[in-house]
Image: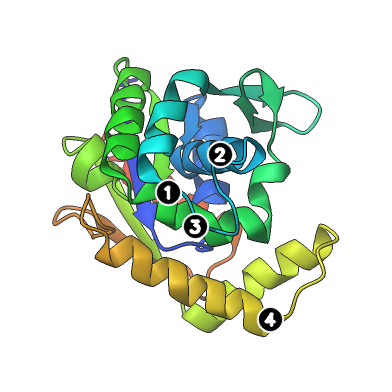
Amino acid sequence: MKKITIAIDGYSSCGKSTLAKAIALKLAYRYIDTGAMYRAITLFCLKQGIIKNKLFVSDDVVFALRDIHVNFKFNLDTNSSVTLLNGIDVEEEIRTMEISSLVSSIAKIAAVRLHLVTLQREMGEGKAIVMDGRDIGTNVFPLAELKLFMTADPAIRAQRRYDELVAGGTTITLADVNANLISRDYEDTHRQENPLLKAVDAVLLDNSNLNKEEQLDFVMKLVSGLT
């Protein structure tokens, strides 16, 4: 079977990572969560005091990149991919609201994006990869055989994210989650470096009223026509 590159872009809390993981598992492909890479850099800068009171100097973040190594491993116990920051599992730490409130600002830094895009392209050189993020189909892999652009009703996205955080033990209000999503959407679509856009040849997937199985079936039908 022909190996392809699958690029998934879209708004936050649309279930990109959930779908990407399911596709990768189904096809026995490698899965890369590019958003987790930006989150890991954000976490490192926060822990090192480079980010203080939500403020930082871009040059300090760029300088810190030399001390940051982000990788992924497959956890057999949970049957899912986890993010490693300098060899340490930070999957839970990078999913907090604190990181969510900072990551879009870090992702706007041109040198950070250039650094990670270089790494992401290296990861995908052999194809057989599913990668999700904000600029995968438009910038990282513009020649990907299959591009998806995911979206969903903003209210549904906020509710999904709220339910996820509460289930994980986070105390937060739905209003706060909604405000964070609005802020991140604006940052993602208005940043100067590779903003969130739907690639011309991307397939739109609005999953507002689709469950996980229906989304996977939708994508696998597309894949079957390409491999």
Q: Does label 4 or label 2 sit earlier along the sequence? A: 2
Residue type indicated by callout 2: Cys
Q: Tell me, yes or no, whether the two marked residues, 2 and 1, touch with CB atoms within 8 Å.
A: yes
Determine which residue is flagged by label 2: 45
Residue at 39% of width from left, 61% of height from top? 150
How far separated are the C-alphas under marks 4 and 2?
27 Å
- In the rendered structure, the answer to whether residue 147 lies left or right of residue 206 reads left
Q: How many neighbours does mark 4 have within 10 angstroms: few (below 14), some (14-19), or many (20 or more)?
A: some
Element at label 4? helix
Q: Quick one: 103 or 10, which is closer to the camera?
A: 103
Element at label 1? helix
Instruction: Identify the image quadrant of the N terminus.
Output: top left
Q: Which mark is residue 78?
A: none
- Quarter-wise, where is residue 130 in the image? top left
Residue type indicated by callout 1: Ile
Estimate the x, y position of residue 58 in percent, counting from the top left.
37, 44
How far separated are the C-alphas under marks 4 and 1?
24 Å
Estimate the x, y position of residue 82 in percent, counting from the top left.
65, 31
Determine which residue is flagged by label 1: 106
Residue type indicated by callout 4: Leu
Residue type indicated by callout 3: Gln
Q: Does label 4 or label 1 sit earlier along the sequence? A: 1
Q: Relative to 203, does residue 171 appear above or below in the rendering? A: below
Estimate the x, y position of residue 185 in percent, counting from the top left.
40, 69
How far separated are the C-alphas under marks 2 and 1?
9 Å
Q: How many neighbours does mark 3 have within 10 angstroms: few (below 14), some (14-19), or many (20 or more)?
A: some
Q: Which mark is residue 174?
A: 4
- In the rendered structure, the answer to whether residue 149 lies left or right of residue 208 reads left
